[in-house]
Image: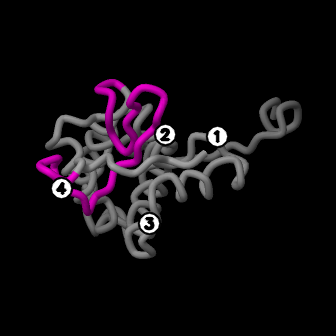
C-alpha cells in the first residue's frame, strides 16, 4: 500500500525467474535494440541518442550502458537465460541469443569501460565508435575509426 500510494509506484508480481525481472526485461530490450540497429544500419551513437534522454531514460542510451555494465556481464546474463529457459517456459526464448557483435567484441578482449573499449573507445579526448564492418586494425585504421559526434 505504501509503495503505491506514497511513492506512486506499481508492484509487479513475478514468479522466480532467472536474472530477476529487471535484468530479464532489460536484456530483452537491449537484444531487440541491437537487432533493430543492425536491421536499419544505425550506428551505436545514433541509437544511444534515440534510446537515451529522448525516451526519458539515462543519457547513456543502450550501447553506452552496456559498456558501463560490462559486455562480459551482459553475455553472462544472456547465457543464464539461454541455460535456464526454453521455448516451453518462455515464448521469447529464441530472442535470447548472443549477438555476433557482442561475441566479436568479447573475442577482442573489449569488455566495455573496464577494458577501455567496447561499443566505444576513448582515445585522448576523442570518443570513437566501434564499427562492426571494419577490420581488426591491420592497415585500415581498425574497428574504432569513426569519431562520435556529440
Residue 7: say if magenta. no
Q: Is residue 15 visible?
A: no
Give me the residue at 48% from left, 41% from top: 64
User: Which of the marked residues, 3 or 4, is nearer the chain's N terminus?
Assistant: 3
What quarter of the picture does the N terminus occupy? Answer: top right
Camera-near label (3 vs 4) is 4
Q: Do tag 3 and tag 4 residues touch (Cβ < 8 Å)?
A: no
User: Which of the marked residues, 2 or 1, is nearer the chain's N terminus?
Assistant: 1
Left or right of residue 86, residue 128 in this image? right
Q: Which residue is mark 4?
A: 135
Q: Which residue is mark 3?
A: 37
| Residue 141 x %, y % | 24, 48
Q: Which residue is mark 1?
A: 58
Range of the magenta residues?
A: 114-140
Q: Is residue 19 above or below residue 143?
A: above
| Residue 23 x %, y % | 45, 43
Q: CA distance from mark 3 to mark 4?
A: 20 Å
Please name the predominant secondary structure of the magenta segment in the image: loop
User: Which of the marked residues, 3 or 1, is nearer the chain's N terminus?
Assistant: 3
Q: Neighbour class for label 4 at 10 Å: few (<14), some, many (≥20)?
A: some
Q: Do tag 2 and tag 3 residues touch (Cβ < 8 Å)?
A: no
Camera-near label (2 vs 4) is 4
Dot 4: what SS?
Answer: loop
Q: Is residue 76 above or below residue 44?
A: above
Q: CA distance from mark 3 to mark 1?
A: 19 Å
User: Which of the marked residues, 2 or 4, is nearer the chain's N terminus?
Assistant: 2
Which residue ends up furthest to the left in the rendered image?
Answer: 138
Q: Do tag 2 and tag 1 residues touch (Cβ < 8 Å)?
A: yes
Amino acid at each position: 500500500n505504501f509503495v503505491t500510494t506514497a511513492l506512486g509506484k506499481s508492484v509487479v508480481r513475478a514468479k522466480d525467474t532467472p536474472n530477476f525481472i529487471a535484468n530479464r526485461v532489460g536484456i530483452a530490450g537491449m537484444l531487440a535494440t541491437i537487432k533493430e540497429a543492425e536491421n536499419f544500419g544505425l550506428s551505436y551513437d545514433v541509437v544511444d541518442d534515440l534510446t537515451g534522454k529522448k525516451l526519458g531514460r539515462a543519457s547513456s542510451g543502450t550501447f553506452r550502458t552496456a559498456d558501463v555494465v560490462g559486455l562480459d556481464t551482459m553475455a553472462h546474463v544472456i547465457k543464464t537465460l539461454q541455460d535456464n529457459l526454453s521455448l516451453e517456459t518462455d515464448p521469447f526464448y529464441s530472442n535470447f541469443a548472443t549477438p555476433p557483435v557482442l561475441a566479436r567484441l568479447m573475442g577482442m578482449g573489449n569488455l566495455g569501460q573496464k577494458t577501455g573499449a567496447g561499443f566505444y573507445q576513448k582515445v585522448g579526448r576523442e570518443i570513437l565508435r566501434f564499427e562492426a564492418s571494419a577490420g581488426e586494425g591491420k592497415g585500415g585504421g581498425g574497428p574504432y575509426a569513426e569519431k562520435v559526434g556529440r
